[in-house]
Image (tube, rainbow, N blue to C red):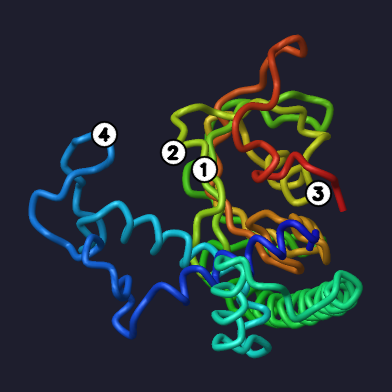
Amino acid sequence: MRNTALAFAVASMALFASGCDKTGKPAGDKAAEAKPGDKAADGKEVKVLGGMKTEKEQESYLIGSDMGRSLELLKDDLDMAVLQKAMQANMKGDKSLLTDEEAQQIRQRLQEKVRNKQVEKMVAMAKKNQEDGVKFLADNGKKAGVVTTASGLQYQILTEGKGVKPKVTDTVRVHYKGTLLDGKTFDSSYDRNEPAVFPLGAVVPGWQEGIALMPVGSKFKLWIPSKLGYGEQGTPGGPIGPNATLVFDVELLDIVKPDAPVGGPGSAAMGTGPKH
């Protein structure tokens, strides 16, 4: 985590904490009390959001929520009373209790702590995803209509088309929806109402193998083990965690000419990123 991001997160969280009472509403600020017909700065009536009728409440809550999420890894390491005290002192212009050198020393220690916690979290997530994936695929492979290939890919034919099957050198047009094992959608061309077009050889191995099994006009369900997807890395900063097993509903619409435009929104999340 960079210095500026960390400092902003801590400061914003402190600002929220110092300005709220136990109910979560701004304390000691009569103007922040919700009243029917409250006006925004531009004179327009503020729309009630989350039960909050003033801009100050809404914006304070949003900052608090965002910063709370950003500080999740440090939730057991922060003294909120001290954090609040430091924020209030800074806003009043009081002299810091720390010298610049001391602040930098603490900042470096805190950054190292965050990095270590991030690694621990990723290791734990990778272990859980691996175990969940192995169990899921073992059970799923026993279901009627589910075929497991030698590589470990699983597929089910939902609709079998009459067209030809693509080769790895072909460019294809597909509609798809990708979900994690918990059912959360991480990408969908259906939601964008725009099929994806890509060279089959550019996608992760699970997609290469699965789509090559599909005659044009087919709709398959694919279950892609992590070793055929994004492996131990997942998509850093993205929706796919380490060792995640992926589930796709895929329609192979057609095989397109080599000079057709490729890619499209969401193609990186769908699987056209680095291959494993």
CA gap, disc 4 and disc 1: 38 Å
> What residue is pinned by disc 2?
191
Element type where label 4 sits in the image = loop
Q: Amino acid at mark 4?
A: Asp
Q: Position of residue 81 (x, y in %)?
A: 55, 88
Front in this rendered view, residue 239 or 254: 239
Question: Residues at badges 1 and 2 in contact (C-beta under 8 Å)?
Answer: yes
On the rendered image, what quadrant is the N terminus found in? bottom right
Q: CA distance from mark 1 to mark 2?
A: 5 Å
Which of the two discs, 2 and 3, sits closer to the camera?
A: 2
Q: Which mark is residue 188?
A: 1
Asked if 255 appears above or below 51 in the picture, the reply is above
In front: label 4 or label 1: 4
User: Quarter-wise, where is residue 96 in the image?
Assistant: bottom right
> Is disc 2 in contact with disc 3, using a CB cutoff of under 8 Å?
no
| Between discs 4 and 1, the one toward the N terminus | 4
Is 190 located above or below residue 260 in the figure? below
On screen, residue 87 versus residue 124, left or right, reads left
Within 10 angstroms of label 1, few (less than 14), some, or many (20 or more) residues?
A: many
Is mark 1 in CB contact (under 8 Å) with mark 3? no
70 or 270, nearer to the observer: 70
Number of disc labels: 4
Q: Give the CA separation, mark 2 to mark 3.
A: 24 Å
Residue 19 horizontal side relative to residue 91, left or right:
left
Could you tell me which secondary element the residue under label 1 belongs to? strand
Q: CA distance from mark 2 to mark 4?
A: 35 Å
Residue marked by disc 4: 42
What x and y, as percent, mark residue 180?
A: 57, 63
Return the residue nearer the eye: 26 or 94.
Answer: 94
Label 3: how many residues lie within 10 Å, few (<14), some (14-19) or many (20+)?
many
